[in-house]
Amino acid sequence: MNAVYVTAASAADIPAVQNEIAAALPGATITDQDDLAHEVTGSLTSTANLANDLGTWLSVVVLIAAFTVASLLTMAAVARRVREFGTLKALGWRSSRIVGQVMGESITIGIFGGAAGIGLGYAGAALIDHLAPKLSATIGPASAATAGGGALGGKASGGLKSLGNTPHTVSVSLTAPVTVSVILLAVGLAVAGGLVAGSFGGWRAARLRPAAALARVE
């Protein structure tokens, strides 16, 4: 035998039952409802932290992938505009001016993309609020509270305390809140993506040689 479960007639009797178990079995480990609630809360906290960490790393991976795709697309666009940039260099444009033009275009595209993303985010949040199922939970007093003790280092679990005097139903709504901080973060990431993509595109444009570019002019 490694566990003994003991039921108390009421929550008020739990301390007395614990004292009797401790006197009868000095080596037993006694677990009451408070210990059980602490263990459950700790497990839920660990699960929430794990989910948050996983979501953070997934967000970082997606962000890196988005910046990489934006940079590659910008460099491909610069490669298609070889004749244009070559002609501008032949007319006397400096590399810094061409780099500034490419970065300005990328940042502008990033700002418009961020605005479009914010609009899609609002639409998605509204869709979730409208279509998400409504959950409910009934909270009320327990019929009996339990406490337990186990000999030889075993454990026993106790019942949970009453959460209210009368049973009542609590509705739980699934929502996707959109805050000002989230919007500012989205705009900042969009601008940062434009800067990163524009930097790579500008570097590609600055390396173009006018003679090589004009050689493609028909």
Image (cartoon, helix red, strand yellow):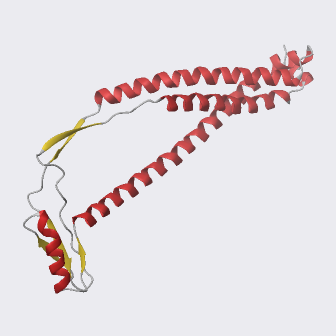
Question: Looking at the image, which residue is at 24% across and 82% down?
Answer: 28
User: Residue 148 at what x, y percent from top left?
Assistant: 18, 73
Question: Looking at the image, which residue is at 31% across and 64% down?
Answer: 39
Horizontal relation, residue 90 to residue 101: left or right: right
Please say whether residue 49 is visible from this viewpoint: yes
Q: 193 above or below 105?
A: below
Horizontal relation, residue 55 to residue 42: left or right: right
Q: 120 above or below 147?
A: above
Residue 2 placement: quadrant: bottom left
Q: 72 above or below 46?
A: above
Residue 110 placement: quadrant: top right
Question: Looking at the image, which residue is at 34% across and 55% down?
Answer: 44
Horizontal relation, residue 124 to residue 58: left or right: left
Please say whether residue 1 is visible from this viewpoint: no
Residue situated in front as seen by the camera: 187 or 82: 187
Q: Quadrant of the C terminus?
A: top right
Q: 14 above or below 66?
A: below
User: Residue 131 at what x, y percent from top left?
Assistant: 29, 29
Residue 86 placement: quadrant: top right
Q: Quadrant of the N terminus?
A: bottom left
Question: Looking at the image, which residue is at 70% across and 28% down?
Answer: 74
User: Residue 6 at what x, y percent from top left?
Assistant: 13, 73
Residue situated in front as seen by the camera: 89 or 60: 60
User: Residue 82 at what x, y percent from top left?
Assistant: 80, 22
Q: How many marks?
A: 0
